[in-house]
Structures are given as structure tokens and as C-alpha cells.
Image (cartoon, rainbow, N blue to C red):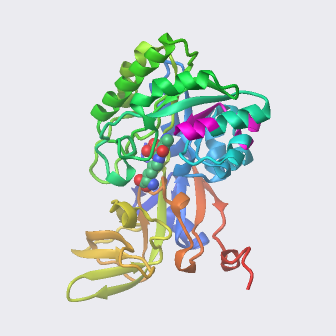
Amino acid sequence: MTAFAYRKGSLHAEGVPLSAIADAVGTPTYVYSAQALTERFREVTEAFAGHPHLICYSVKANSNLAILKLFTALGSGFDIVSGGELARVKQAGGDAGKTVFAGVGKTPEEMAQALVSGIRLFNVESAEELEALDAVGRRAGHRAPFALRVNPDVDARTHRYIATGLKTSKFGVPFEEAVALYAKAKKMKGVRALGLDCHIGSQLTRTAPMRAALTKVADLYVTLKAKGHALEYLDVGGGLGITYSDETPPSPQEYARTVLAAVKPTGATLLLEPGRSLVGNAGVLLTRVLYRKPTEARTFVVVDAGMNDLIRPALYEAHHEFLPLVKRRGRDVQVDVVGPVCESTDVLAKARALVLPRQDDLYAFMSAGAYGMSMASTYNSRPRPAEVLVDGEAWRVVRERERVEDLWRGERA
Ligand code: LLP
């Protein structure tokens, strides 16, 4: 099913015309489809059905409480990278016991908090972090369950800003150091080795790098077991890509086949950390056209959403389709869609052929459910967008538009 589709020329989210939401809530506004979120989660679950596994939705992709609650109800666990994300998971009724904690810079306070909450697994990213976790475990009087995140030195063939599995990346411990670190951990009283972890990057559209990395990691898992480490979990990270324009990422089934073939020899329970592939195409960002500005060099369309609301085009030169909420007929012209932010990189859609929008026309940036609102800022003192969740014919605001007074909360003049 396509959650976002035209019906009689009007772009809908499930049964709701998006223009009705824009009129009621204003713009810019993120809109998510509950049905799309649910279907995608079920698709991934079913793809791995024959193998013991736990899906730990990667909270950073979209951390709205309503979305965390929806995934909790579907049985999901969570992949977190901060105490803030842990607090969100708990606030949404999520289970810390189904949550894994990654990140190269966990503070001892965050570790202690997660340990007390009963976290499933700490994904440890350096030797010094392991020592810090050991200290936290000893102080708390029980062993912190951990996996080492190893860096398999594989080129994920994605945008260089979102590749994480190369030697030059800050993530994970060098592959060659893993065996020695597990041996060292065995002598520690505050930690307990329970798994092995890797994540090579995001928006992966090819299976070959996944296969290469996971084969290496599965091999290491078997070696570690043979050395007497009582590992149970193999965490394969996230990274499955989605279609923004013409990419053809593996389907969840194809992804599962690749992963399962590589990890079969381990007999481990799989932990999966999908983010983008669950929420990316389940969300859009609604915006309104403010001005048209034809110049000698280009025609600019100025909209009321900016790079502070959706930073992906500015940060990664990412492509998001730009669709009118009400289809228009006419001749295509080439335009640059830009936001109001005072930065030259505030170009949300570059060199797009479309019927010249009129002032006040409504549009949607598509595929904006992942790393959209979660990366939004208030730069230029722009309050962050509202968020809406659609379910069938019904919809509700799941985050109010930020108010200007919120902008200076905590400041002292
Ligand atoms: N696990 C770990 C350890 C991660 O670092 C990430 C993403 C994920 C799971 C989830 O990956 P996903 O399934 O969403 O690809 N802001 C960038 C993406 C950064 C990804 C960071 N790590 C973007 O907008 O493209």
C-alpha cells in the first residue's frame, strides 16, 4: 500500500487530504502515516520470522513519543544513543529490557541510568569506554551486559557522511583488537560479554557491503564463542536504505536473506536496528509557497520550511521529492525550492522541473519521516514544526508547533 497517494488530484495521507491538515495546523508540518509505520514494521518482522530476533527501532530516526508508542505496541525494542533517548523510550511506555545503547560518547551517568533501567545491551565502542562501563557496573553491584561494536573496515558505498564502517571512522573498535578486548573484559567484575555488534552505515542500497561486513563479524562471533565467551546476541545494526527518488534498495525480504545467510553459522539471536527503513517513507513535510523569484540565472520558489526544519538536503545534498498537494496542469519550468533561512545551503530541492507554483500553494517534501524532525533545530529562531499522525480517516497533532516563547526557555536576560 502507498500511504501517500493522489486521489482525485489531491495528495492524501491514507484517507485524509493533506491540504486539510495544512489548513487546520498550518505549515511547516510533519505528517506521518500510522498504517505505513505498522506495515513496514510487520514486513521486517515477517522477513525475519524464521530466526530468533528482536527489532530495536533506532530512535534517532524519529523520536516522537507517538511513534515510539506505536512501535512499542507492535512489540519493538529500541536502539538508543543517549540518556535523552532512553527517557523518551520510557516516557512512551517502551521496555528498557528490549533496548540497546550505542554511541561513542556515553557518559558514566548515562551508563548508570541505563543499567538501573535494566537495559538489554550496551554496545561499547572503545577500550576506555569498556573500562568506564566496568566501573559503573562495579559501583552498581551488578555486571553490565555488553557487546563490542567492531569496525569491520568495509565500504558501505553510501554518502560519506553516513558511512560508519571504515577504518577512518570514529565508530566501533578496530576489528583486530576485538579478541584481546573480550579477553580483558573477562577479568572485569563490572561487565558481562553478551554479544557482538556492528553497523556499517545508513541508506545502504546494496547487499554486497552488508554481506562482506556480516560475514566477517559472524566469523568473529564464532571465534569468540570458541574461546569461551558466552555470547547470545549478534547485533547487525541498521542501515537498510529507502527510495527517495530512483534508488532500488533491497526489499526487507532480500535484506533478511542476506543477513540470515551471513549469520547462520553463529546460532545467535539477532538484534536489528532499523531506523530509516521503518519511518522514512511514512512521513512527509508540508510547506506553503511564500514567493516566486525569477532571476536571470534561476527561478527560486521560496517556501516556509527551511533547512532548520529539514536539514538533509543542506547536509548531505539529499533528494526529497517535492509534490503539490493539489495537482496542477501546465508547462514545467525549472526551479530551485529554497527556505527562508539565511544560508546559501538552504536549498531544499534543486533544479526541479515543475509547474510554476503560485503563492500560497501547498506542497510536500516526501520521504521525510526519518531524520527530519529529529534533526530539526531552531536556527534563525524559527520554532520547530508541528507533527501529525494520520490513522485511516482520523488524524491528530502528536507534537504542537513550537511557540516563540519556547525559543528562550531557560535563558536569562
Ligand atoms: N544503529 C546505529 C548504531 C546507527 O548509528 C544508526 C544510524 C542506526 C542503527 C540506524 O540506521 P538507519 O537504519 O536509519 O540507516 N542523519 C542521516 C543518517 C544518520 C544515521 C546515523 N546512524 C541521514 O539523514 O541520512
The mark tally for this picture is 0
Q: Where residue 10 sits in the image (x, y, percent)?
A: 42, 63
Q: Would residue 18 be found to the left or right of residue 349 on screen?
A: right
Q: Where residue 192 sits in the image (x, y, percent)?
A: 64, 24
When asked about the image quadrant of residue 240, the answer is top left
Q: Nearer the viewer, residue 50 or 27?
A: 50
Q: Would residue 345 be found to the left or right of residue 195 on screen?
A: left
Residue 9 appears in the rendering: no
Magenta segment boundaries in residue numbering = 113-131
Residue at the image point whose x is 63% and y is 22% from the top? 187
Residue at the image point whose x is 69% and y is 40% from the top? 94
Q: Where residue 185 sits in the image (x, y, percent)?
A: 59, 26
Residue at the image point whose x is 35% and y is 23% from the top? 215
Q: Is residue 288 above or below residue 371?
A: below
Instruction: Name the image quarter holding the N terminus.
Output: top left
Q: Would residue 311 be found to the left or right of residue 70 on screen?
A: left
Q: Is residue 189 above or below residue 133?
A: above
Residue 40 appears in the rendering: yes
Q: Is residue 279 above or below residue 28?
A: above
Residue at the image point whose x is 20% and y is 89% from the top? 296
